[in-house]
Amino acid sequence: MALMLQVLALEPTSQILSKEPIVPYAILLVVILVVPILFERLRLPGLVGLVFSGLVLGPSGWSLFQPEESMIKLLSNISLIYLMFVAGLELDLEHFRRRRGRSFGFSTFTFGVSLVMGALIGQILGLSWNTSILIGSLFSSYTLLAYPIIHRLGVVNNEAVTVTIGATIFTDIGVVIILAICVAIAHAGTFSLAQLLTLSGWLTVYSVAVLAGLDWVGKEFFRRSGDDEGNKFLFVLLAVFLAAVGAQLIGIETIVGAFLAGLAVNEAVGEGPVKEKVMFIGSVLFIPIFFVNLGLTINLSAWVNSLGTLKITLLIVLGLITSKFIAAFLAKLAYRYNWQEILTMWSLSVPQVGTTLAATLVGYQAGLLPLEILNSIVVLMLVTSTLGPLITSQVAVGLTASTTEESALTILPEQKVEKTNTAFTIVVPIYNPQTQQYLIEMAALLARQANGRIIPLAIATSVAHMDAPQLEASMQRSEQLLAKATVQSRVMGVSAEPLLRIDDAFAQGISRSAREQKANLIIMGWGKRTGLRARLFGNVIDNVLWASHCPVAVTRIVESPKKIQRILVPLENLIAPALQPVYFAQMLAEVNQAQVTVLNVCDRRTSASKIAWRRSHLSLLVSKLAASNAPEIQIIAHENVAQAILQAARLYDLVVLPVIRNRTSPGGLAVSDVTTQLAKQLTCSIVMLGEPQRTQTTAIVSPQHNDYSLPNR
């Protein structure tokens, strides 16, 4: 034993790692799990920690990993392909369609100005025209890191914001096309006009084949696969790697094929559990590996000891920020946007992360970009990913008044009122006897106010044989729960129609039953959300939220709903479609003779005139909800939204929170950061109200009428 320890002590660490392939994987997983958490607690982006980890573990640090190792190369190539696929999959085609003309115009400004600026910097540094043009294309793309911020502020529908989001389609496509041509020219050494035309022709044919072919095949496959999410997920992965192989066959980079594959299956995948799983796998495994590998390639000593590298970095950072501002200013001249809109467009287009870094790494590996440029682009990523969202959080607040003021005149609840001939129906899935009573009480109160009905629902999971003892036991338990629920509802004076369903899974059974019964609302108890399976595949609540056709109320009730007298509804977005929680609260308040308070938290620097406008705007929106006992409006100026709501909630029995889906969330119940923090710290009863995933036209009737339907987007 002692001899073995001496041998290990003398043997280099890199040789030990090469002999035990499982060790590098274990180290990578530890880094991916621990480092982002530590950096986020230091209020630094997690991706900065991953790049720093690669720097420490690579040749510039402990030399535990070498970029040339076969295992590292394989993981790097897969993560690079997956990163570009996710970039294509995340592009918001809906925002592009809304303002395609102006999106194309702004993309022309930002792409053209950035291309010229980058190429000029390349020439100043004495690089070839091929390399200079590639640097210019790297400047032209951008990553919407600040999307959650503008979503929380309720300014996503502002025209300037929509145009900026839509323009990412053109800029990303432009980057991958220029990258493919520049790398092909670099590999060929000398490149004639005929060769360039031939490559362009093959690239055009390939792009059309991928975009049109995979789009059609994807939609057909998804249509025929039904609810089989496993096969859909495998199809998406197969599409990525087939497109990458096809790119190799015509002599272009694999990331071009991966990006086009993401764009091709974008609509087929849509917003749902399959996309959620694809994003989850990428965000927890492959994309972190990409950033770690990026850190491995950085030569820290060359960057620190070289004054020239510092000058290059400064030139690139200033050039990028300046070019984005010029592009935004040109948009101001062309489309007559105000300064707050222009500054928002500028801040949204500054961050350089996904496509920029992927193209940079490919250019470096192809020998087009020198190491100094690679190091400088990494610093550019660190600076812009911090600076961009910070500026957005400051300047986008000014868009709220101009954007939502217009919506106040055009999107009032009364303008969408449609009476429905069917009774207001509430489906209540029951499984836990400890929470069943309060769920039935909550549903009964709402149904009583709406002259509706409740459907207690029990799901018995199916097995291969219908006479199996497990199924029989499950059905007996479900029948007992339904009998108890029926008695409880009758005591409350509400009609109950118990329903027992045999289905493959709880979530599918709930969403299908709700659709069959034409439910207006689903009320569920709080579910367990821990464990690897819950994170990877989502739990019952997640899947119901994705699949349901109607709103879903996820509840954590600490006392009888009949005792609720004060209800708080915090609203982040001052727009009519965000009033769904107010409708829910007002329905409950009417039957309990309770008081609803609508709370909005604004920045401390908000002027008194803007606070007054917010108050009058909210009053206008909620005035149609009740003929009497209208909701109270409260505006608080505070630097921390969550803390302000927590302080206000101490005086209330129930807090109704909206489930605002996060566009870039890796998985699970995707809610805003504020809602997540509140759900952990609130001690009173909570209702998290989630809208259906698909946009639908549903009747919206205020609680002063006899027929009710909760509003959808």
Image (tube, rainbow, N blue to C red):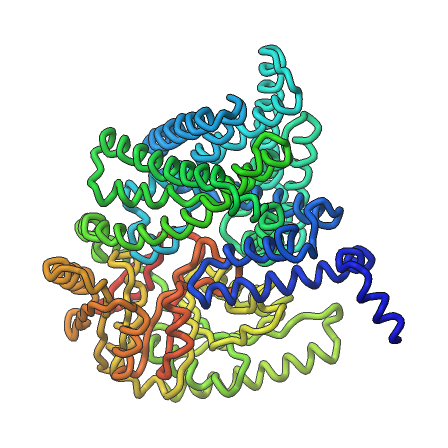
Q: Is residue 636 left or right of residue 159?
A: left
Query: Which image quarter holds the N terminus?
Result: bottom right
**Picture quadrant where residue 582 is located:** bottom left
Q: Nearer the viewer, residue 88 or 687?
A: 88
Q: Is residue 390 left or right of residue 481?
A: left
Asked which quadrant contains residue 449, the reply is bottom left
Q: Position of residue 189 (x, y in %)?
A: 65, 19
Q: Residue at x 48, y 65 (%)?
A: 669
Q: Which residue lies at the image location 45% right of the left edge and 71% below the top edge?
A: 427
Q: Nearer the viewer, residue 387 or 637?
A: 387
- Image quarter where the C terminus lies is bottom left
Q: Residue at x 40, y 82 (%)?
A: 557
Classify residue 444 by image quadrant.
bottom left
Which sits in the foreground, 499 or 436?
436
Q: How many marks?
A: 0
Residue 267 appears in the picture as rendered:
no
The answer to whether 648 is drawn above or below residue 286 in the figure is: below
Q: Position of residue 78 (x, y in %)?
A: 66, 46
Rendered residue at 43%/38% (across/down): 311
Q: Is residue 399 visible?
A: yes
Is residue 320 placed above or below 680 in the rendered structure? above
- Percent x, y of residue 410: 20, 48
Measured as percent of width and height from the top left, residue 526 is found at 47, 76
